Image: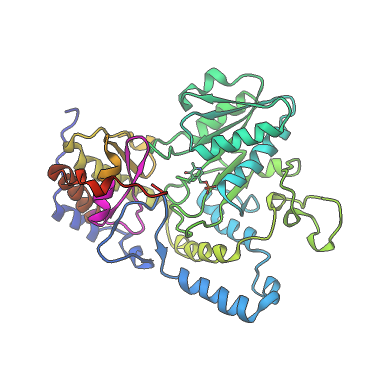
Amino acid sequence: MSDLRPVPTREECAALDAADPLAGLREEFLLPEGVLYLDGNSLGALPRRAPERVREMVEQEWGHGLIRSWNDAGWYGMPRRLGARLSPMLGAAPGQVVVCDSTSVNLFKVLSAALRLRPGRRTVLAENAAFPTDLYITEGVTGVFDGARSVLLPSAADLDDHLGEDVAAVVLSHVDYRTGELLDMAAVTERVHRAGALMIWDVCHTAGALPVEFDRCQVDFAVGCGYKYLNGGPGAPAFLYVAERHQADARQPLSGWFGHARPFAFEPGYEPVDGVGRFLTGTPPLLGMAALDASLDVWEKVDLQAVRTKSLALTDLFMDLVEPLGLPVVTPRQQTLRGSQVALRHPDGYAVVQALIERGVIGDFRAPDLIRFGFTPLYLSYTDVWDSARHLAEVLETGEWREERFTRRGAVT
Ligand SMILES: *Cc1c(COP(=O)(O)O)cnc(C)c1O
């Protein structure tokens, strides 16, 4: 054993809960009785105020206000207004973030804009182990730019070997969706800039999990989703960031009317509006925006640094508790190198996760053999973590995961 940390007792965890400054935030969420929810990195929990906010939009703004609500209820401004609410969590000064579309679509837009901003360069670097949609979109974008190509790095650590003079942009995830590994945003962005390329960060597993500083790190573009740690609801609209210094020159190809300088002039030619609004495309999904708006009410009360501190304590605790089980832990032990999840390797990981779910412990499985647990400090306690680790130990000790019913797979894993 490298270090012999004493494993905390359940009573010690209860004492940590009693002293937890974030403990009261659990009241802001509606979670089913008897569920230990360790999948907030896939779909965040339901904020208590979201049903009411969505109902208000449906019944009042839509049902009563009808078309008038575009002005009277502020519908038109929602992509920018929600972007402004998110900005402090991203370390972004006002006017650089909008909420719109999905992460995939937003990546298409910002990567296309980045290639246009580096006309002499045609290579996009991405990481082989990236979330696949990022790679698919990168293929899609390079496919519509003459001579463009993507090069997949074996790992982000190989970046320097590939940062040549033809590289226009680099797309990387700040936190790896499988391993939970966290990259150094400032250092990587600086290396990319030194090579004359633009940096695009995917912060799907960062936003709401830990603070970031886009402006201070000189990030060029970023994309992220609203339904994971942000708790915006299933299929919540995503967001994108475009650094102010690029906005005047940046052009994106999904040039719909919501990004036009005068959408209601109904002119035949496209002229992008000033600012980050030119990255909007069409009519926003307002019901999804309402749910995300309600989740941002919760975030407004929260110090993200305190969230990070508790997240690290929860992930440390879980790793300490599961270490004796002997499953390889793929998430870095060092705090500065991980996000807010812990992934363990097990050859029958899928069945183990199903057995846990039957016990009310909801984690998830990522092919080929990863059991993944997300830790969300707003609604998880230290005793929840202790109990979850106990269930995992029991599932493995009893071998109950071997039961046939745990091997059947649904469409979504
Ligand atoms: C969840 C996730 C996405 C999801 O993209 P959608 O367009 O919302 O489906 C993209 N990238 C990463 C890194 C993710 O974790």
Which residue is pictured at 39% across the width and 35% down the height? Answer: 181
Residue 366 point in image, percent of width and height? 37, 40
Which residue is pictured at 34% across the width and 68% down the height? Answer: 27
Q: Is residue 24 visible?
A: yes
> Hey, which quadrant is residue 222 in on the image?
top right
Residue 177 point in image, percent of width and height? 42, 40
Residue 334 or 206: which is nearer the viewer? 206
Which colour scheme appears in the figure? rainbow
Residue 129 point in image, percent of width and height? 46, 31
Indicate yes or no whether the magenta region holds residue 354.
Answer: yes
Position of residue 73 relative to residue 304, above or below, is below
Q: Is residue 218 visible?
A: no
> Left or right: 22 with respect to 217?
left
Indicate yes or no whether the magenta region holds residue 249.
Answer: no
Q: Which residues are magenta?
A: 353-382
Position of residue 258 relative to residue 184, above or below, is below
Which part of the image, by quadrant, shows the N terminus? top left
Residue 193 or 166: which is nearer the viewer? 166
Q: How many marks?
A: 0
> Left or right: 323 with respect to 332?
left
